[in-house]
Every structure is written in structure tokens, then in C-alpha cells.
Image: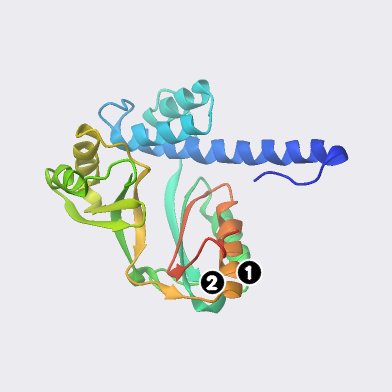
Amino acid sequence: MAGHSHSANIAVRKGKQDKARAKLFSKLARYIMIAAKNGGGDPDTNLRLRYAIDKARAVSMPKDNIERAVKKGTGELEADSLEDVAYEGYGPGGVAIMVEALTDNRARTSGDVRIIFEKAGGNMGQPGCVGYLFDRKGLILIDAKKYKDEDAVMTAALEADGFEDLQKDGDVYAITTDPTKFNGVLDAVVSAGFETIEAEVKQLPKTYTEVDVELGKRISRLIDALDNNDDVQAVYTTAHLTAEMQE
């Protein structure tokens, strides 16, 4: 998100940084609003809202912005009517792409997403064209370097109805849950004293597609372009993208 260049371009860089920051705050505000709308405005009883607020605080989103987003979600303040929409399509190489968005104008968002797909050498498909390649699951990530006792993490997760699996992936424990019971599992894990790196309901690929570096970079550029759209909240792909591909 940072700009590049020096001296004469410092103002340009700051402008880009400010624009990126404003875009991030806008996405987080929408995330907070939906969480508050669906689960109430108290983060102590609404874990999705608590996580959304934690994400906002982690990037220094102003307290007033957070509180305003919560009030818009609960209806205390007037807000645009937002709805969840999903788009499916194919990226470069034919890999599956799923896009989740929050919008107050379906036609605008659909048109924007379609253009982004086409500019990247992909195409937006019909609903259901790639959805079967993903499973909607709750995903909780915990730092395995900080918490070395895998059995203790497993025990905490098992306490909750809705726990499905725990896998250690490098330095991370990945807990998957029934999406409808995600909050209960998250509450059990947090109550047991484990801090989470990430905790959200996501579209997880059933299997991953291996791609070469060049194709992976093209797919990453498409994902970045989609994510840069104000309405887009999350982008998922079946492509196995390495750190090199995402640089």
C-alpha cells in the first residue's frame, strides 16, 4: 500500500498511503456494521463484532469511526442499506475465484467486478459455477510458536459444539468449525486463554490447484485488483499461491 520514490514524490506517496488507509477504514467500518447488525452492538456478547473491532484497532482506526460504525449497524444512526453479494468466476489459467462484497448498489458492484475480471484475463461466471469447489467454514488461526501445547489447544476447541478439525500448518494451528457454530468455538478458545491471529467464516477450497510462479503472479494481481474495490470484502481462490507469487 505504501508508495515508492523519494524527495519530490513524498507527497505522492503520502497521498497514496492516505487513500489506502481510508479505503481500509471503509471496509472495516462495513465489516463492523454488518457484525453489529447481525449480532448486536455489544462486543462482549457478539464475538464477530469483537473481532471486527480488534482488527480495526490493530490498524489504528479512530475510536469515533468504530463507534459510529457500531451505531449504524444497530440502527442508532442512519446508514446506507448494505446487502451481502457473492460473485464467482475464473482467473488466469481457469482457476476458481470467489468474491464476497457488501454493497448498496448491486448493479454498480457487479459491473465493477466483471470489468476487473476481464482486465486480468479472467471472466465472471454464473452463480454456482465454482461455488461447489469451496466449503464455507469457520476458521480460527492460533500462533503455534506462542502456544506450543497442541493438545491444550485441541482440548479447548473440543469443548465447543461445532468444532470440526485442528491442523498444524507450519507455525499456525488452523481450527475449522461448522460456520453456524463458529462463535461458540471461538468463545471456547478465547475463554481458555488463547489469542487468535485470525478468526472468520470463510470460503475454503476443497482442494488447491498448483500453479507456476508467473501464473501465480497474474492471479495475485487479479486478487489485489478485486480487493482494492471499495465494496469487496474478501476474495478466495483455489490456486495455491506462494509468498513469491504474492509479492
In the displayed structure, 158 sits above or below 195; it is below
Task: Read off the residue under disc 2.
Answer: 91
Query: Circle 2: is it few (<14), some (14-19), or many (20+) Cα within 10 Å?
Result: many
Q: x, y percentage for residue 198?
A: 37, 44
Quadrant position of residue 216: bottom right
| Label 1 Cα neighbours within 10 Å, binned few <14 / some 14-19 / many ≥20 | some
Mark 1: which amino acid?
Answer: Ala
Q: Tell me what residue is drawn at x 48 percent, y 32 percent.
A: 58
Note whether 219 is above or below 203 in the view shown. Answer: below
* Viewport quadrant of the C terminus: bottom right
The quarter holding residue 39 reads top left
| Residue at the spot 50% in from the left edge and 64% down from the top edge | 242
Which of the two labelled residues, at mark 2 and mark 1, occupies the earlier sequence position? 2
Counting from the top left corner in percent of width and height, residue 79 is at 48, 32
* Mark 2, secondary structure of its residue: loop
Q: In this view, does 28 lie to the left or right of 44?
A: right
- Residue on which disc 1 sits: 120
